[in-house]
Each structure stands twice: as C-alpha cells, then as structure tokens.
Amino acid sequence: MAGSAFFEAICRALAGADGMDRWTARGTLQLALMDAGLDAATVNATQLEVVIDRLLPRQLQSVAGMNVTRVCAHLRDVLAGAAAEDAR
Amino acid sequence: MHLFVFFCVALYSVMSAVVGVRLVLRARHTRGLPELLMGVAYASAPGFGYPLVVVGSGVVDRTVSSLLFGVGQACIVFGVTCFLFFNGRVFRPESRQARVAAALGGLALGVSSWHRVKVHVAVGAAAISLSSVRRDTIVTVVVLGLAYAWTATEGWRQHRMMRRRAQIGLGDPVVANRFLLWAIAGALQCVSDAVIAFSVHRGDNLTADLLPLFATSSVGAVNSVLLVLIFMPPAAYVRWLSRGPRGALAAV
C-alpha cells in the first residue's frame, strides 16, 4: 500500500543510509509507525517528526555501522523540505 | 418487568433521537458526511423507526397500524444503512469492499423488512410468530450484529492506535476515549443481537419473554449513557480525560 508523500520521502532518505536498502528502510519505518499507532497512508509531517525524534532511533540502534544521530538529523531535514514543499 | 423494559427502551430511543438531530444540525454547519450519516442513522432507526414499529404493532386500527409499521420499518432500514455507510466512510474510506459490504447489508435489510411489512399488512401484529417473519427477524439480527461487530472492531483498533499515539505526545485523549466507548457500545449491541438471535431460534416471544426483553432493555439503557458520553460529553468528563499526560493515558 502506498504511503503518504511524507512517508515516501522519509523512506527514500532512509534507504540511502549505511546498512539500509529500500525494503529494510520501509519496514523499519512502518514498525516505528505501528509503535506510534499511526498509519503510513495518512501520516503527516508533524507526526513523522515525533516518530523520528522518539521512536526511530530505537529501531535503528541495531543496524551495524549506522550513525543514528546523523541519520535522524538528515531525516528531519528531508522532512522539513517535504513539509515546505507541501505548504507551497 | 415490562415497565422497566419500556423505560429503558424509551430512554434509548429518546437519547438516540436527541443525539441524531444534534448531529444532523452539526452536519449542516460542518458539511461533513460522517456526522450527517451518523445523525440520520440514530435519528432514523432507534430514534423514530423503532418507536413507530412498536406503536404500529399495538394500534388496533389496521390501516393506521400498517402505516406506522411500514414507515417505522423504512426508517430502520434507512438508518441502519446509513450506519453501515458511516462505518465504511470513517474507518475504511479507500475501501471499495467496505462500500459494497455496506450496500449489501442495506439491501438484505431492505428485502427482509419489505417482506415483514407485507406480512404485517396481511396478518397484523400476530405476524411476528409466523416462521417466515422469524426468518426475516434473523436476517435483520444478523445484519445488525455484523454492523455492530464491525463498529466494535474498528473502534477498538482506533482506540489502541490512539493510546499508542498518546504515549509519544500525539493524539487526543478525548477522541481515544470516544473510540473506546464506541467499541463498547458496538460490542454490547452484538451481545444483545446474539441473545435475540438465540431467542428467535428457540421460538421465544421477543415482546414477552424475559431473556430477549432483558437483553434489549439493559443494553439500551447502558448505550443511552454511552451515547451521551460519546456525542455530548459533560464538561467535567472531558476535563477528567484531559487532566494531564499520565491522567489522560490512564483514563483512555
């Protein structure tokens, strides 16, 4: 099932991180959304920001060779860009 | 016992009518389809349809009885169909299967009610004991049971999601609580429907025997309270739900 534009943007950005591929990124993000009680199809930028801050770091901790803090900061930038684009 | 049953069912009908009309009035301002569907559902089926059917069954004059019974049944079918489409629209807005299921439920209910009205016109209130009318009653109870089971399942799912959101600072505890109450109301109606189906299967008289009367009246009374808490919650109740992050979580 297709996710919201924000979800897809974060999936693409996460897939480019060390130790990740497209499917792992998508699955990891979906697990974090499930923990948050959110749905990929309807999740918005504000909700994703909270997920990236509060839940995603925990999911990513076990990925070997990943700098979780840097990746999450990058995801926040991508999300801010997507939100700004959406606001236009 | 009959007085108690009458009071509980009347209370549920009055509360349903009040909530239904309020929701329809709100829908006029918001132009929202969900509140319109739910408002029409409550006002039409338990609010006006059910009392009309009960009164129609008791009126001696055959023409008036048939008219009231027919209008009441039409209100019930229309209301329950709106309720089914509300479920589809709110919980599964993208799902074609949900719309088809809602339409099929409404159709099954319409056909069985049409047959029941025809028999009522021909035979009068005594038609309730005929086997073909019992079959129609079972169809009605099954459709209603499925509709309420759908409501209870979706309400519980949404409640669990809302609770998880609340744990990370997202979501509204009042809305989460509303989904919980919604799930409880649906589950109670399912239990009531199951008891009625069992009674019909056993050959009980639904308007005289203790078991179906108790199921209908007690669930009606509890659901009257739930309707108020869901759609017209008192300010104190909302304050209690929203009294702080930990309190809100404990409440929902």
Image (tube, grey):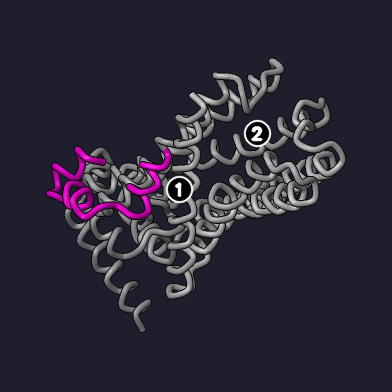
What residue is drawn where x is 51% and y is 42%?
B151
Is residue B146 or residue B112 the one in the foreground? B112
Question: Mark 2 packing: few (<14 Cα in 10 Å), some, or many (20+)?
Answer: many
Q: Is B48 left, or right, of B221 in this rendering?
A: right
Question: Which of label 2 and label 1 is nearer to you?
Answer: 2
- Amino acid type indicated by mark 2: Val
What residue is drawn where x is 50% and y is 55%?
B90
| Callouts 2 and 1 in the same chain | no
Q: Is B193 left, or right, of B171 in this rendering?
A: right
Image position of B3 with respect to B28: above or below: above
Chain name for mark 2 = B
Residues at marks 2 and 1, CA–CA distance in whole angstroms: 45 Å
Residue A54 shows in the view? no
Does B226 lie within the magenta span?
A: yes
Residue B187 position, x and y percent, is 47, 33
Q: Secondary structure at mark 2?
A: helix
Image position of B251 with respect to A8: above or below: above
Chain name for mark 1 = A
Image position of A27 with respect to A12: above or below: above
What residue is drawn where x is 50% and y is 61%?
B34
- Amino acid type indicated by mark 1: Trp
Range covered by the magenta-colored residues: B223-252
Q: Is A28 left, or right, of B153 in this rendering?
A: left
Residue that carries the numbered disc 1 in the rendered image = A23
Residue B65 position, x and y percent, is 74, 47
